């Protein structure tokens, strides 16, 4: 965990290996999700393949979040919200304090919860051991997150309800004169719901340019490829015609993900459509096409193939970590050298 | 040992629909999860994927019904009555159109959390004029509810079971509209249960009656209409009172319907409603949640003790072994 502390709170522009760090975190997110899916004998794996870079880039570079004061090992489930329950705890607190200058993160596709939990681990907001609670009775680390789950601020497992709530939050923040922005992570299936379009309509009507949506356009949903279920394309021009500022990017390209968030606001809500590969990093998943939504092994032989792929990925990961550690050491040595140098010259 | 039937809807619905060309299926991106993937592949011309867009789905179902088709909407129960309720009420229920709502994963049977738990669906559907409300409790009912729904001139909401389902009732005793199944007759206590609660209830009534308590146990598969004379008879005969048990909030479902019936018929008896006590739930296994919210056999024993004011020496161990379903059993197409 300690080696990650330097990048807990987002930006570190001066760090010349920031992109390598984000990629390494994305790789770890994928690996960790893969591990838990194997342990559970099934689960939401394609979502980690498609969105690992998205989560890593959001948490490590794009969003400005404060440090979280929430427990690294989450509390057990402490009841649903209500007047009789003073113990209710909002999972959004894992994203740091609500301060005027800080950003907010609204996580919409609740079935991506495991990817979110894995991302929180990469940025030191959740302990790796905390994930042992995943999908266990009586914990908050539900398979489909709700607003008691770490990192989850709104209850949005009935999909396409988050964007409107983010709109309300953004409006409220503007009324209060707050400079922090509201980031929303969405899945592409959510663009089939009418409510999404009602939200875009209102965001642009109220010129809520403090809202930035990152959508994982993996072109997949429960029944399979979206084009076989209900087409949503052309998404860019549809959103533009609703008054949004849209960037369609390669969702595995960290620069491309980061750039739109660095632009000055222009009066329009921003949508970054991250086109992704739902098998990225685990090419074995391609054998399962056309339906990738939820991995459930067909038989023992398939499970064995995934076990092997997982083991191979683990080995590679060890090598990658060694390499990264070396890079960090070199960097430290170089920084020491240059700062010493400036002292003598000064 | 009860027989466990794996995914009975898959083949049964295909067979059943073979000679009914006006039966069409509408899906909202949960085709596999609602056990109609094979139906889609068998009758591709009668299957329509509407995507994850439930409000629009209701309108399409209404339009098809107006044109003489009989739409069978297949999605999770929760996505039928929460988001698209206005469309359901005004486009379908008001004009009394023959749309069949197959609501999967009712109550706390879902592996999803609060957003996937249909806990007030019976209440809302009961309150919807023209709506008939059914609930399946075993494989026989999953197979025979199609005939019941099909026979009704108007919209029908069904709480549907999927995956590995026990066969509690003989295959040749199909579900009948507004007709309770009398599982046990007695004079001291009346127990009414629906859906998955019936299996649980049977465990408790077995042990209680072996200790000398005389119980009537009725399985309810029609929530609306709710005027089966057998129900009133059982309630009237129960010396100590009535217990209802439902996989649902106690407000507006079976417990409420029973209370309404008792008040209207002037049956002055005590009533204990077992169910979710006006609370949302959270995501966990069905077994865990049934225990946490008191939807289990032991809760029924405690309720019986309360009504009869006599302690029964019954522990959890005395109640027949609980049938656990593996999280990823073969019978499940997807976890969700
Ligand atoms: C309102 C609503 N309808 C249906 C569902 C069931 N559901 C869960 S995930 C999902 C697919 C949504 O598409 P997407 O998030 O793009 O799927 P993925 O890329 O993860 O496969 C559906 C239909 C839901 N959660 N909410
Ligand atoms: Mg998708």
Image (cartoon, coloured by chain):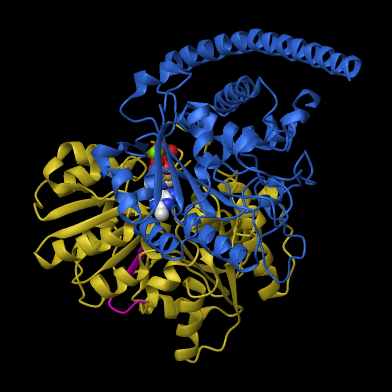
Chain colours: A blue, B yellow
Work out whether B283 lies above or below A329.
below
Left or right: residue B34 versus residue A56 is left
Residue B227 placed where, x, y %?
36, 79
* Residue B212 shows in the view: yes
For the record, the magenta segment spans B128-134
What residue is drawn where x is 65% and y is 24%?
Answer: A18
The tally of labels here is 0
Q: Quadrant of the N terminus of chain A?
A: top right
Q: Does the magenta stretch include residue A97?
A: no
Which corner quadrant of the figure contains ligand 1? top left
Left or right: residue A328 versus residue A213 is right
Q: Nearer the viewer, residue B90 or B39?
A: B90
Left or right: residue B173 versus residue A28 is left
Left or right: residue B197 versus residue B18 is right
Residue A70 placed where, x, y %?
78, 46
Q: Quadrant of the C terminus of chain A?
A: top right
Q: Is residue B129 magenta?
A: yes
Residue B10 placed where, x, y %?
28, 41
What residue is drawn where x is 44% and y is 58%?
Answer: B195
Residue A99 placed where, x, y %?
72, 55
Work out whether B272 lies above or below A107.
below
What residue is drawn where x is 71% and y is 11%?
Answer: A327
On the image, which quarter does residue B219 sit in?
A: bottom left
Q: Nearer the viewer, residue B85 or A13?
A: A13
């Amino acid at each position: 965990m300690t080696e990650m502390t330097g990048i807990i709170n987002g930006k570190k522009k001066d760090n010349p290996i920031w992109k390598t760090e984000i990629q390494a975190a994305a790789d770890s997110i994928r690996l960790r999700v893969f591990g838990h899916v194997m342990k559970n004998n099934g689960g939401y794996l394609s979502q980690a393949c498609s969105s690992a870079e998205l989560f890593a880039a959001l948490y490590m570079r794009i969003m400005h979040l404060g440090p979280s004061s929430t427990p690294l090992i989450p509390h057990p489930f402490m009841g649903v919200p209500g007047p009789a329950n003073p113990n209710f705890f909002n999972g959004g607190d894992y994203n740091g304090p609500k301060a005027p200058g800080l950003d907010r993160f609204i996580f919409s596709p609740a079935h991506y919860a495991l990817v979110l939990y894995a991302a929180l681990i990469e940025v030191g907001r959740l302990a790796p051991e905390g994930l042992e609670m995943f999908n266990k009775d009586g914990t908050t680390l539900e398979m489909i997150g709700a607003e008691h789950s770490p990192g989850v601020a709104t209850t949005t497992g009935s999909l396409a309800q988050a964007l409107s709530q983010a709109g309300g939050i953004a409006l409220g923040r503007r009324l209060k004169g707050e400079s922090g922005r509201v980031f929303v992570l969405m899945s592409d299936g959510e663009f089939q719901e009418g409510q999404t379009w009602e939200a875009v309509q209102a965001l642009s009507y109220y010129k809520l340019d403090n809202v930035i949506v990152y959508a994982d356009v993996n072109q997949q949903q429960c029944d399979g490829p979206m084009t076989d279920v209900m087409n949503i394309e052309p998404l860019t021009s549809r959103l533009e015609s609703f008054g949004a500022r849209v960037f369609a990017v390669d969702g595995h390209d960290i620069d491309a993900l980061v750039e739109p968030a660095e632009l000055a606001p222009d009066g329009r809500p921003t949508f970054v459509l991250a086109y992704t590969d739902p098998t990225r990093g685990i090419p074995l998943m391609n054998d399962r096409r056309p339906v990738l939504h939820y991995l459930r092994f067909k038989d023992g032989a398939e499970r064995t193939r995934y076990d092997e792929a997982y083991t191979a990925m683990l080995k590679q990961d060890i090598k990658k970590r060694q390499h990264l550690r070396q890079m960090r050491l070199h960097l430290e040595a170089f920084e020491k050298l240059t700062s010493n140098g400036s002292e003598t010259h000064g | 040992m009860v027989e466990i039937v794996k995914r009975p809807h898959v083949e049964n619905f295909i067979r059943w629909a073979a000679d009914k060309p006006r039966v069409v299926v509408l899906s909202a991106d949960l085709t596999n999860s609602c056990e109609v993937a094979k139906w889609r592949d068998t009758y591709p011309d009668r299957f329509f994927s509407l995507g994850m867009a439930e409000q629009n789905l209701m309108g399409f179902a209404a339009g098809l019904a107006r044109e003489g088709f009989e739409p069978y909407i297949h999605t999770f129960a929760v996505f039928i009555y929460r988001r698209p309720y206005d469309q359901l009420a005004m486009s379908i229920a008001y004009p009394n159109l023959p749309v069949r709502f197959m609501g999967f994963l009712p109550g706390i049977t879902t592996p999803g959390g609060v957003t996937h738990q249909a806990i007030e669906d019976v209440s809302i559907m009961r309150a919807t004029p023209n709506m008939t409300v059914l609930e399946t409790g075993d494989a026989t009912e999953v197979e025979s509810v199609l005939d019941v729904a099909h026979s009704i001139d108007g919209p029908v909401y069904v709480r549907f079971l999927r995956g590995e389902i026990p066969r509690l009732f003989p295959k040749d005793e199909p579900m009948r509209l507004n007709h309770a199944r009398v599982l046990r007759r007695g004079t001291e206590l009346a127990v009414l249960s629906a859906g998955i609660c019936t299996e649980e209830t049977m465990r408790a009534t077995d042990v209680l009656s072996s200790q000398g308590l005389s119980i009537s146990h009725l399985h309810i598969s029609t929530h609306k209409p709710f005027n089966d004379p057998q129900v009133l008879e059982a309630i009237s005969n129960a010396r100590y009172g009535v217990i209802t048990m439902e996989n649902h909030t106690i407000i507006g479902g079976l417990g409420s319907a029973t209370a309404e019936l008792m008040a209207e018929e002037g049956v002055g008896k005590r009533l204990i409603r077992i169910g979710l006590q006006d609370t949302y739930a959270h995501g966990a296994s069905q077994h865990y949640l049934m225990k946490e919210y008191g939807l289990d056999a032991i809760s029924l024993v405690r309720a019986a003790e309360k009504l009869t004011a006599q302690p029964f020496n019954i522990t959890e161990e005395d109640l027949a072994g609980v049938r656990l379903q593996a999280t990823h059993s073969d019978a499940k197409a997807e976890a969700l």
